Amino acid sequence: MIRRLPPLRSLEAFIRVVRAGSAKTAAAELALSPSALSRRLGALEEFVGKPLFERKHQALKLTEEGQQLYEAVAPLIDEMSDRVDRLIDTGKVMRLRLGVLPLFGSQRLFPRLGELRKLHPQLHIDIDSGHAAETKLGDTIDAAIVLSEGPDAALHSVRLDHNRVHAITSRELAAELGDRPDLAKLSKQTFLVHNDLPASFEAWKKALHLEKMEPAAIDHFDSGQLILEAAAQGLGIAIMHDDHYHRSHDSRLARLYDIDVDSPYSYWFVCRPRALQSRPVRLFHDWMLKAGL
């Protein structure tokens, strides 16, 4: 007797919902209506004979059985997808036009791109490191990794991290300023603020109860790499993310004060929903989620 297999489309919908964390997002990725997505999930639950999600208002949360199913089938589906991709590879170059900020590219993307190249040697990526990447989607770029408080709701988006704000400076200046915030000392300093992170400085001041502080100067940068170099050279106090600081591995830098401040900003992968139908975008999107960039 041939054993029945669960509907592949239902499994695909199930995995998409789990990874996207949202039925709405998963439906957009699969180009399905919410009702069509619901039917696919219902068919899978009927097949396994158990509820896979707890449904509360508009949210879906995995049941214990749903979690067990996901852990069992997701790696197998990923492996099958990879094998199919290799089988249908025509040998032609596939090209993805990707917007990436330089600091994310150097610290997080490029150290992992070798893994993607081994999986999909025909996938090549053109990099646009300019700003305002969201405005270029569907025009000069296919997808982007942006630093944002929240992308346009019309875009397909995946949040890649949650950050904290650090005040980063040279070790010498950190020693001079001491372990506790001193309004008089800080007011004499130059602060270095990234153009993409203007609200981070306000969040940091508020957390330290320094809302009324007026520094000697605020210098603005459009490059994360240069702002960290400026801080290392003692040119001021950089307001950046904890991830930027830790991944820099720069012994010249020090974190100023041991205070945690939630950042208003995160890195997001964004593209237009229809772009997910493009094989280069889909391959990069799925690899990125699996790699945990």
Image (cartoon, rainbow, N blue to C red):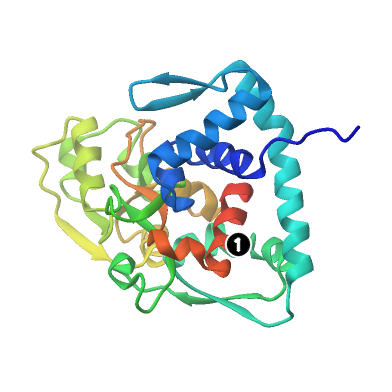
Helix, strand or loop at disc 1? helix
The answer to which of 11 and 129 lies nearer the viewer is 11
Q: Is residue 235 left or right of residue 84?
A: left
The N terminus appears in which quarter of the rendering?
A: top right
Q: Is residue 190 above or below residue 138?
A: above
Q: Is residue 213 above or below residue 89?
A: above
The answer to which of 177 and 132 lies nearer the viewer is 132
Question: In x, y percent, where is residue 128?
Answer: 43, 76
Q: Quadrant of residue 132?
A: bottom left
Q: Is residue 202 above or below residue 278?
A: above
Decide if residue 251 is in sight here. no
Decide if residue 149 is in sight here. yes
Residue drawn at (53%, 65%), measured in percent from left and top?
A: 281
Residue drawn at (12%, 41%), measured in percent from left and top?
A: 213
Question: In x, y percent, where is residue 62?
Answer: 54, 23
Q: Quadrant of residue 131?
A: bottom left
Q: Is residue 34 above or below residue 191?
A: above
Question: In x, y percent, where is residue 162?
Answer: 41, 39
The answer to which of 123 and 231 lies nearer the viewer is 123
Residue type at numbered disc 1: Leu
